[in-house]
Image: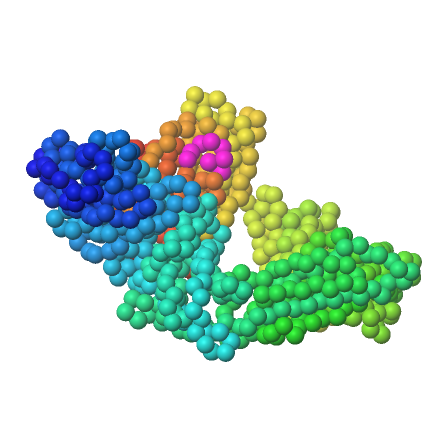
Amino acid sequence: MILAASVFSAFFALAPDETVRPEVRLDVSAEFPTGTPGVVLVEAFSGDGASLGTREVRPAANGEVGIVPAETARVRVSSPLHETCEVFVEPASEIVSCSMEARARIHPFGDRAGRVWARRNEPGAPFLAIPPLAKEWGGGFAVPRGRIDLVLAPEGSTGSLLRLVDAASLAESRQPAKKRDPNRLKVRFVDASGAEVRDRPVVKVEPLFRPRKEEELELAAWTDFYERNGASMASGVLVLDPIPERREWVVFNVRFEGQPGVRLAAAGRLVDGVLDLGTIRLPRRTSFAVSIRSGLPNEEDPGPLTLDLSLVRPVPGLNPPARAPSLSRETRAGSAATFDQLIPGEYRLAVRTPDDTVGSFEVPVAEGDENRLDLELTREVVAGRVEDENGKEIVNALVGLMRTWTKGGSRHEVRTDAQGSFRLEFLHAGGSVNVWATPTADCATVAVELDPRGPDAAGILLRTRPGGVSVRVRDATTKEPIGDARLELDVALAAGPNWSKRGRTSLPDGVFSLCNLPAGSVRITATARGYDQADREVEIEADQLAEVELSLERAAQLRGKVLGSAGAPVPGARVFGPLGPFVGFEGEPPSVACGADGTFEMDLPAGPTPTLLAVVATGHRLALRWMRPSPEEQPIFLVAAGSDEVVELRYADGVPVRDAWIVLQKDGLLVPGAIFEEAVSAGGCVFEPSSRDGFQRFGGCVEPGTYALHARLFRPGGFAHLPLGAYQLPLPPGAELRSPLSEVP
């Protein structure tokens, strides 16, 4: 409503000699809620920007507030509940008008105190602190209307950032914030001499894990916030206040001018709600110079060289840098390149030509600018012979060269000749190389690491071991060999890295062999169509051949046919199963595709216990069925896809559950997320994580029925499930799912 008030006949008192033009009347249009003071603050400015005075005025019923001084060039009108209005006074003006736009009044903290910052949805707009409204103005905070970014910081709690929220939807919201400690972060910085660092750093908020697009935009907004608000530097102490509510998901990259900066996690000593990270020493300016001279014959030009430098680990006592240097420099043989703004530590250097890696090694970089490495680019040769355990040459063995920490285009391969010999020629700038040989397709690799400029490079001997494993797969009932069975061998060596090998048994003897294995353990998994899986773990002794026999039990067969609601076959439908109690955490379960007539066959565990299957098909809701093995064809009828529903996820105290996925449980078994992803791809449903305000699109996914629902959230150390209760699906639009708990267990 527009409140009536008395009219001021004059706004400012004028001396007689100040009257240089007729009086100018100011009219203000503003709506004030009943019970508020209903006054505006009017300030006049001269042509050179000087203030002519400020008065608190109550507009009359017709909006008139009085007369402004004759020399007024600009008038500013403000009130706690409105956007500030500024108007220019033209020389011939007799009246100027100011229409004030009301702000949205919000109460985000209930009865608690707190702070609010807001920025408009405009390029380059800064966050501005919003002062709390006095009790006589209704309390709360008055924020701009429309889509805005908000930072809400309840007293004693972390801050939350709401992106592009409609302020009108928050009007009169008295939702209490959840109390979360800590609410501030403090860290002291000193330079290499121990003196306090007084320059204000740039604080960038980055994700600890790969973010979704919305999370990436939120973190960018936090970075913008700390650019002008929330980050203070005094006496070498940086204070971030508030810190993000999801502090365990982010890191703070703090960079000073001319420094690589440091990377801070929001974890430290907690004192009265403040995370005190102690004192961090910034190293003095550190650089590293690399020069490469050419030792190639006949003035051979290898072309442009790329130097890739990446940090392996900083020296003890230094925090990781704000951005771990992974730097590249372009140079040529006979030239040098310098890396600056480094943090002292161990680095990995790779030297590359356009199509090969010619050197790779670790280099220590000490604090300061005295670090230098001189390299020489030469052409080297390694040569040798591949033999079996009896000293007999192995013809046509695959021999290769590989460098440590290489990426693409760094491998040379040749075959051994009739004498089992090989020769590899390559460019080399330093570091060791690995020369390896795979004698045959069913043998493990044998390798040696050496310096190609050393005395051993011309007489390399790669010899296989007599140790290995031979696996025979049989039918448990008929004892007949099973050819083309799939095997996976997970090898854990007593000395050396672990690795895996996949293969198939040969026809008709059902045998798979792997030679040249040193001592260690091997876990063998065998599967074949129509059989249950079998596993065995065996120990391989040095220079011994382990013979293993696996017997596979016949699997029970399920024959089914997927049909639409009208009884027509659904070709291409995918049947997943069996679903187990933990398959939701282990990825996608096995599946088969239906043929053109909608039929499928699937191996199921034998026995009377039914198995839960999931069926996904384009244009249909996800179907969950308990099935038993049967030689007869069993029909599965699908329901057509439904419309999307929007639901709300909330804790018991009404706080929104953010960044959560709904997880379904059918008869005590979890439905894997991978199956929902398949259903979304098939157009059968919509399944998205909840937004910042707890809203989630979740619809068209499953056929009608009763399901137990959970909210799945990521927490440090893994996923957590928040129970929501049992619901009849599909849910009605706008349904609220409220957990009986106020925290994630």
| Image colouring | rainbow
Q: Position of residue 689 (x, y in %)?
A: 39, 43
| In the rendered image, the vertical position of residue 496 relative to residue 394, given as above or below | below
Q: Position of residue 99 (x, y in %)?
A: 23, 34
Residue 533 shows up from this direction:
yes
Which residue sits at x=25%, y=31%? 93
Which residue sits at x=50%, y=24%? 569
Left or right relative to 375: residue 92: left
User: The N terminus lies in which quarter of the figure?
Assistant: top left
Camera-side residue of 363 and 280: 280
Which residue sits at x=23%, y=47%? 52
Residue 707 shows up from this direction:
no
Q: Residue furthest bottom?
A: 193
User: The C terminus lies in which quarter of the figure?
Assistant: bottom left
Q: Residue furthest left?
A: 6
Left or right relative to 326: residue 64: left
Camera-side residue of 576 and 641: 641
| In the rendered image, the vertical position of residue 39 relative to residue 400, given as above or below | above
- The stretch of residues the image draws in magenta is 678-686
Q: Is residue 595 magenta?
A: no
Q: Position of residue 238 (x, y in %)?
A: 39, 66
Which residue sits at x=51%, y=45%? 589
